[in-house]
Every structure is written in C-alpha cells, then in structure tokens.
Amino acid sequence: MPALLRTTLALLAGVVVTFFTISAVEQLGHILYRAPAGLDWQDSSAVSAYLKQLPAGALLLVLAGWLLGIFTGLTAATMLAGRCRGRFALAIGCLVFLGAVSNFYLLPHPLWLMVLSLILIPLVTLICWWALKKRFGQPVTATEGENE
C-alpha cells in the first residue's frame, strides 16, 4: 500500500476512533446523570437550565471523554500507520479543540470547565504525540514523500 494512502487511511481511522470514544464516554455520562423526564431538547432555555444544575462529575466526564478520545484516536492512527506523525496529533487535537469550542459556544458551560478544557486539550495532544513518538520512533529509512 502506498505510504500516502496508508497515512491518510490511518488518520481517518484515528478520527473515527476519537469521536467514537468521545460518544461512548458521553453516553456513559447520560446513563449516570439522567436528564429529567420531559425535558424539551429543542427549548434552549430549558436545556440551559438543565446544564447549569449538572454536578461537576458530569462535566468532568465530558472533559474526560475529549481527552480519552485524543489518546485513543492518536494511538489508533499511529498503530495503523506504523509511526507517529505530527499531522495526526495536529488533526485530531484540532478537531477535538474546535468541537469543544463550538460546544462552549452553543451550550452554557461553567468557566472552570472551559478554561480547563482549553488548557488540557492541547496539552494532552502534545503529551500523547510525544509519548507515541518515543514509543514508535521514526522508521530507519523514510521514503520520499513520507517526511513530516
């Protein structure tokens, strides 16, 4: 398989794993912290009131999903590609970061969660990338077009 195709498919798989992980952790949060019966999800004021009364554990679970998603997606992309690429970390980290920011824009979140998320998402992305780069290293000889 050509290196470019393998890298592209690995990145795509990493993004899918990232968002599957985030969805799974958020579903766990919905099971643990059930919404009140009859909540109208189309009524923004009702949703805002519900989100404001959520306990910190529910909000931390959302953050944990984002961070775990980065880790699992970056790991999956690295393992499928056979090496850790900076573009994997950049793409996956940016997608999760932009998703978090859009979530903050659309739904009310406490300031502490927004600040913590905006610090931890890039930090965890860099740490995961660094750890995977140390673990998988660079190939002995890089073919043309495979350089970062």
Image (cartoon, rainbow, N blue to C red):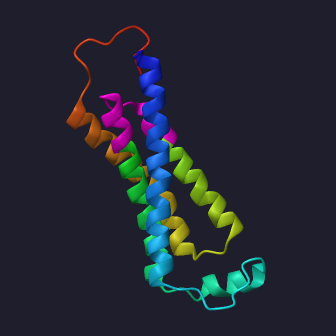
Magenta-highlighted residues: 75-91
Horizontal side of 4 relative to 35 (left or right) equals left
State the residue in front, 86 or 62.
62
Q: Residue at x 23, y 32 (%)?
A: 136
Residue 13 image position (x, y, % from top left): 45, 40
In the image, farthest residue toward the bottom: 37
Q: Is residue 7 above or below residue 70?
A: above
* Residue 80 counted in the magenta span: yes
Q: Residue at x 77, y 77 (%)?
A: 42
Check the picture and name the quadrant holding the N terminus.
Answer: top left
* Residue 111 counted in the magenta span: no
Residue 139 image position (x, y, % from top left): 25, 20
Q: Report whether residue 15 is seen.
A: yes
Check the picture and name the quadrant holding the C terminus.
Answer: top left
Q: Is residue 13 above or below residue 103?
A: above
Residue 129 image position (x, y, % from top left): 34, 41
In the image, farthest residue toward the front: 1
Residue 21, image quadrant: bottom left
What's the magenta bit mostly, secondary-structure-wise? helix
Q: How many marks?
A: 0
Q: Residue at x 54, y 52 (%)?
A: 97
Horizontal side of 24 relative to 137 (left or right) equals right
Q: Report whether residue 120 is seen.
A: no
State the residue in front, 1 or 129.
1
Q: Is residue 80 above or below residue 126?
A: above
Q: Residue at x 69, y 64 (%)?
A: 105
Residue 98 image position (x, y, % from top left): 60, 51
